[in-house]
Image (tube, rainbow, N blue to C red):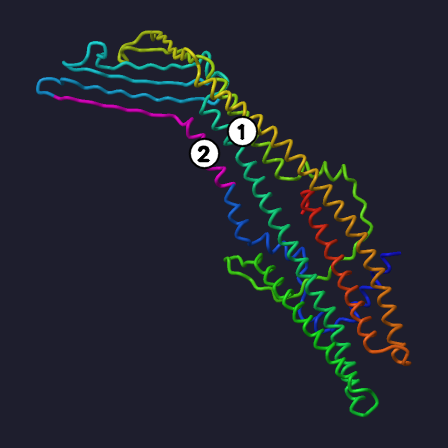
Amino acid sequence: MWRILVLCALWTFCALCPLSVISASAQTTLESFLRAVEASHPSLRAAQYEPDLAEAEIRNALGRFDPMLNVSWLAKPKTGGDKLNDLEASLELPLDMTFGPKLKATYDRAVGTNVDPENITTPGGEASLGVSLPLFQGIFTDSRRNQLRKALLRPDLAAAQFRLERNNLLRAAALKYWDWSESVAAVAIIDSILQFAETRADLITRRARAGEAAVIDSVEMMQEVLRRRGERLRALRFAEQSAIDVSVFLWTGNLTPITVNDLPEPLPIAGDTTIDVDEAVRRALVLRPELRRVEILQATARLDSSLATEFLRPFVEADVALVSYDLTAGGSPDLKLGLKISQPLLFRSASAGAQVADIAVQRADLTRVITERVIDADVRNAIIAVDRAEERLAVATTETELARRMLDVERRRLDIGETNLLTLNLRERFYAEALQRLVSAQADYARAVVQLRWATGTL
């Protein structure tokens, strides 16, 4: 029943509004406005660089696994024979896999009269091909692999950050849009009752000049006209300010600001909205980018914790290589073995790092709990706002219909002399105030729907 009353009240409101206000220009719908904001707003265009930054971080992390070529040559020529001719070359390739192996290929050639006997080689030089393997620290992860795994999470983090900025921007833009629509509707209401007052003032003035009405009635009516003109200027200022606030969100493709010249779409009429709270919360937990961002931060903290745990183990690295001490000679290569051990006696720095990393993980877990609770509260508050806005709209619709009936009765009573001009003016004011409360209820409902869409991640 109350929805029928809403339609009746809005039909009456539109009938009262001057055509010059309603059809002064084309309408800008909410969806077209939001698409224009999303297409060219500088903050979103800046956020679109995040995927490029994520790609750069991945390439930087992959760069730590690039083959490393080192070449060193030192020569001290002398007549009759070189004092020193030393060439050292090596190629190292770290691998991103369990046990963190590194492939190594080396070539050394040191000849001359002044070469250290430990470094001297055959004229053909010696070469080796081998692998280095960590035995304790660095088996499951190391700084290189940890940086790469964190970098691989960066694209998802960039996408979540972009969606977060987009959702917040569109929510702010949509709320300003409905403020604008509300202010335009308020001007239309004031225009309608001002038109009534001006018409009645003109009629009473002519009757007073003809001696058919008291002069004081024309003074009273002109006072009412001036009062309503003042209210119109006040409402017009709010509408102009709202149009400027909306224009802040609009830009061209080359970042030139756009000024709004159209009118907004009318405020929506609420319908029966049945929302499953639990389903809305579940949807929000899936779609809200805040939670996805926290999940990535949790994964990053756990990667750092795993790396810190590795440093609690001693560093032991084994080298195995096949060596040819003379490349110009045939025969089977020799086997070269090596073992490197590095171990702090107390592990105080490593244990402190592990403690800090563990605290970071616990903080990330707590942040997720808080974020889930905030999202749950956002959804429930938004649903309550929609429900209360619908109830308020029903009350405002009934009030407006009753105020319109009282106004019609008061006009008929004035025509037959059973009431006075002051009472009729007051009735018109009451009807205009009821219309304004109806518009305010519609605007609150529209803003509540925007908030619900944002809270559930569907804006």
Location of residue 307 in the rendering, given as x and y in whole percent from the top left corner: 49, 21
> On the picture, is 459 further left or further right than 200?
left
**Residue occupying the far bottom of the picture:** 210
Amino acid type of the residue that numbered disc 2 sits on in the rendered structure: Arg
**Residue occupying the far front of the picture:** 216
Q: Is residue 134 above or below residue 93?
A: above
Amino acid type of the residue that numbered disc 1 sits on in the rendered structure: Thr
Location of residue 52 in the rendering, given as x and y in whole percent from the top left corner: 49, 41
Q: Which of the 4 image quadrants contains residue 381?
A: top right
Judge the density around disc 2: few (<14), some (14-19), many (≥20) Cα neighbours within 10 Å. some
Q: Which mark is residue 59?
A: 2
397 in magenta: no
Q: Which mark is residue 247?
A: none
Q: Is residue 426 above or below residue 369?
A: below
Q: Which of the 4 image quadrants contains residue 22?
A: bottom right
- Please report the bounds of the magenta region as a residue range: 51-77
Give the SS element for disc 1.
helix
Q: Which mark is residue 300?
A: 1
Location of residue 288 in the rendering, given as x and y in whole percent from the top left corner: 65, 39
User: Residue 424 versus residue 242: which sits nearer the camera?
Assistant: 424
Q: Is residue 393 above or below residue 408?
A: above
